[in-house]
Image (spheres, grey):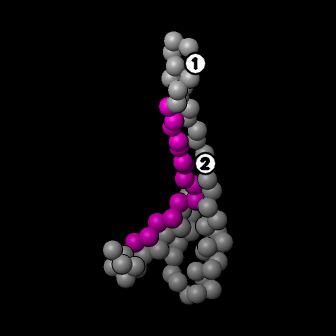
């Protein structure tokens, strides 16, 4: 898909990333499970300022930045 074919772009302020790994350990129960989670925050307020400077219509809420291209 090309950019000019998109009608709606939604960029969340927060997103979560998760990793899960199973590795070999020692002893009779030799499986070791490791799970990690990260919560990331994106600078959508800064992006909003750049979009304003470029005269690109958009809306900014507490949770997301939204660009409607139609």
Residue 35 versus residue 22: which sits nearer the camera? 22
The answer to whether 23 is drawn above or below residue 42 in the figure is above
Other residues around mark 1 within 10 Å, as few (<14) / some (14–19) / many (≥20): few
The answer to whether 12 is drawn above or below residue 36 in the figure is below
Other residues around mark 2 within 10 Å, as few (<14) / some (14–19) / many (≥20): few
Range of magenta residues:
7-22
Query: Can you tell which mark lies on residue 39?
Result: 2
Q: What is the CA distance from the residue labelled 2 to the residue labelled 1?
A: 32 Å
Counting from the top left corner in percent of width and height, residue 43 is at 64, 65
Position of 68 with respect to 16 (left or right) is: left
Number of marks present in the image shown? 2
Position of 2 with respect to 15 (left or right) is: left
Q: Residue at x 36, y 78 (%)?
A: 2
Residue 33 versus residue 54: which sits nearer the camera? 33
Q: Residue furthest top?
A: 28
Which residue is label 1 attached to? 26
SS at badge 1: loop
Residue 63 versus residue 18: which sits nearer the camera? 18
Counting from the top left corner in percent of width and height, residue 6 is at 36, 75
Q: Quadrant of the N terminus?
A: bottom left
Counting from the top left corner in percent of width and height, residue 7 is at 36, 75
Q: Residue at x 51, y 76 (%)?
A: 58
Residue 2 versus residue 19: which sits nearer the camera? 19
């Amino acid at each position: 898909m090309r950019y000019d074919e998109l009608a709606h772009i939604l960029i969340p302020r927060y997103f979560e990333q998760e990793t899960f790994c199973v590795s070999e350990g020692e002893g009779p129960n030799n499986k070791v499970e490791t799970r990690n989670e990260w919560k990331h925050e994106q600078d959508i307020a800064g992006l909003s300022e750049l979009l304003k400077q470029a005269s690109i219509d958009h809306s900014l809420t507490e949770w997301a930045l939204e660009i409607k291209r139609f």
